[in-house]
Amino acid sequence: MKTRKCFAILAAAVLLSPLASCVKDQPEVFDKPSSARMQDYLENVRDILKDSAEGWALSYYPGSKYATCYIGLKFTAQEVTAYAQDNPEEAVTSRYKLVADDGAVLSFDTYNAIIHYYSTPNQSLYQARGGDFEFEIMKVTAERITLRGKRSRNFCYLDRLSRNVSEFLAEMNEAEAKLDIVAFTGEVTGGLVEGFMDGTSHTLSIGRKGAEALEMLSARYMVVPGGIHFNEPFTFQGVTFQDFTYDSENGTLTGSGIAFQKVIPEGYVPYSEYLGNWSFYYYHGENSFPVELVEFEKGSTFKMKGLSEFFEPVIGYDAARGRLTWNAQAVGAVGATTVMLAGWDLLTSGGSLSWGEEYGMIGIVTDNTAVELEVNWEDNGQSDLVVDSWVLWGTDANGNSQGSFTSWTMASGSYQLAYVTTMKKLVE
């Protein structure tokens, strides 16, 4: 047995030895080192960027809560001029770089008020708006460059423009003004479905009729003349969608041959009607204090004044459903400690908490015809943690817990705000 095994090994060695010599004598596959090839690739990207006389339209997808938008960009060898969708005549010029950083990267490395709007934190937004200023270059053609944000991991797209950048952005603004739909119903492959369109984040959600938010399929879209476009198609119940046309006269949204009907969601309240003074009730409704909702980012967020003398939390507006959202968030910093307003589950878990931004509450209005609106605060259903209260909590620079933050208080007289229930609008 041993003799046969040794013979087999020797025979294999004899057979493999000429193969080894052939491999050794093969010429180099590339005539340049990888660093030189990368530099050639980056210079080719630069040439393509500069080559568009009218510039490029960046389909920009920041963090999920913030508006998908177009940014117009014109490139020279070292500078980029940016044009904002909400003000197409405004132009801001700064520098950019094409660098190798675990792959090819387009970096807007000097501050530009338009490009950096979603990625720059401030006193009110400690974690900024979820945007990017550094993008991995994923795919390049003469007409489209596919990018991926290094922080958000969202895909963004640079499309070559064939007409004036300001005219293009103005046309997109006009298209958005005509898209007056927030919800729809219809039938897909024999099943009744409903959908919502958040005009703030430009997110379409669709699911079976009566489905919970977590069960719905969501995708980010761009507004285009006559409807909306998804850069990446999505499939729902066996039907693939990518483009929808909107007929405002008939109230229909049509995609892949399926017509959906526009509806107004139950309990829908316009953004402007939330502005003003409210009575805020907590501890099962037994205690209250006055607050005021003021405009922060028009149509998308409010600041709540009166909750604390130390901070004013950001309250979101779900534009698709016309309701308030209140998520865990950073509300300030003291030294090296970041102060978080953490979601707190007192009733069902005995005090579990989290400061992840997905945890929080939604404000449900049962009667949107009432003169004095009443908002009922409920857990947002995004996790097993049922948020019914808020608590101030400290974290370090790495997001690790430092325990309860008792140096600040809320209108409850404590760093705790237990058993939040409702808000009632005060009408003069």
Image (tube, rainbow, N blue to C red):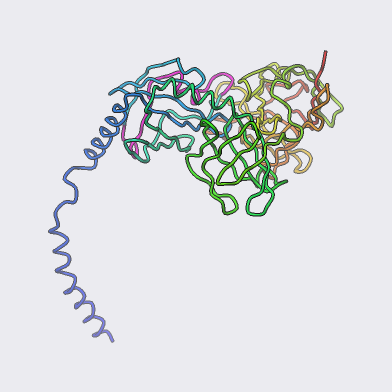
Q: How many tags in the picture?
A: 0
Q: Which residue is at the front of the view, 326 or 73?
A: 73
Look at the image and give the residue range highlighted in magenta: 99-125
Say which quadrant the C terminus sits in. top right
Pinpoint residue 368: horizontal percent, then vertical percent: 79, 28
Left or right, residue 290 beside residue 18: right
Q: Which residue is at the front of the view, 280 or 93?
A: 93
Left or right, residue 3 beside residue 249: left
Q: Is residue 141 magenta?
A: no
Pinpoint residue 386: horizontal percent, then vertical percent: 73, 40
Q: Which residue is at the front of the view, 378 or 8?
A: 378
* Farthest-out residue, bottom: 1
Where residue 308 sits, quadrant-wise, is top right
Q: Is residue 116 magenta?
A: yes
Pinpoint residue 30: horizontal percent, then vertical percent: 19, 47
Q: State the predominant SS element of the stretch in magenta.
A: loop
Say which quadrant the N terminus sits in. bottom left
What residue do we see at 35% from left, 34% from top? Answer: 105
Where residue 110 sits, quadrant-wise, is top left
| Rendered position, 187 above or below 161 | below
Pinpoint residue 339: horizontal percent, then vertical percent: 62, 26
Left or right, residue 74 beside residue 127: left
